[in-house]
Amino acid sequence: MTRKKDFLTLADYGREELEGMLDLAAKLKESWRQGRPERRLADKILACVFLKPSLRTRVSFEAAMWHLGGHALYITDAEIGLGKRESVYDVGQVLGRMVHGIMIRTFSQESVVELAQATPIPVINGLTDLVHPCQVFCDMLTIRENGLPLDGIKVAYLGDGNNLVHSWLNAAASFPFDFSFGGPAGYHPQPEVVERARSRARGRITITEDPQEAIRGAAVVYTDTWTSMGQEAETEKRIKVFPAFQVNRQLLALADPKAIVMHCLPAHRGQEITDEVMDGPQSVVFDQAGNRLHGQKAILAHCLGAS
């Protein structure tokens, strides 16, 4: 029996498999541009389970399924009560008998892993507090589209050591690029994630509290909101701690002159990034958002057996 393909973390995937999926994403995007239908998932149904709301995740997965000939069901915790009204195991067993795959966006990575173990159908991690693998996979597509090889470049991330940073560290364990994180003390990525990436990485991994060191010479400059969903009580404290890591014109001048600027959105303009940079010529922020559609089509095709 063929082992089902989940997409829970980039750490589960090697370079060859990820490159094949990126090539498929580029192919599917080109077919879309030329108006050629790709009905690889005809009659397939994806359950989209949201315990955390999202504009990009919902629209991109629903549109991706439609483009590939399938259908997506939007399900909130009001219908499930995951782990409260109904156990994760029972939800996995029920959905496994009704749909062909599950995308879940939630808080706990443990719940996603438990769900994947409980159901016979593929599970795709749309986001947890630990990792954001779909976002970073699609970001690698955007980097390639901008003529940058994933071999040998420097990716700099400024801000909070959050789920995106963890997924970038996982990606750096598969691709030989240098990854540099710059953030204030107390807001670094989890040490175990850093050490696991360092034990596997062929590029250099830097964790620093100096924003200038982090960004210097980078080909890709990345940032995200200083306060993620679920951390709202810390907003005022974080606003006072992070300003030195704002991606602005002065700091961007230390990067490679041809560097691209990325942000996963939503952005708090004037905090982690200035309007001048986000709307400037080096920004690929909105192209990056658009590629969530095409990258995730490749993830869906891979996991649902249509690649």
Image (tube, helix red, strand yellow):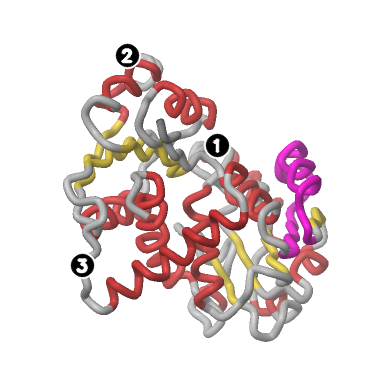
Label whose residue precedes the other's in the sequence (3 or 1): 3
Three-letter amino acid code of the residue under disc 1: Ala
Rendered image: mark on residue 85? 2
Query: On the rendered structure, is 193 left or right of 20?
Result: right
Up/down of 240 relative to 8, above or below? below
Up/down of 140 relative to 122, above or below? below
Magenta segment includes 151:
no
Q: Which numbered mark, 2 or 1, is in the foreground of this view?
A: 2
Crowd band around label 1 with a 10 angstrom C-alpha radius: few (<14), some (14–19), many (20+): few
Label whose residue precedes the other's in the sequence (3 or 2): 3
**Most distant residue in the left direction:** 43
Q: What's the CA distance linking mark 3 and mark 1? A: 46 Å
Q: Which numbered mark, 3 or 2, is in the foreground of this view?
A: 3
Q: What's the CA distance linking mark 3 and mark 2? A: 41 Å
Please name the residue that numbered disc 1 is placed on.
233
Residue name at image x 40 percent, y 30 percent: 1
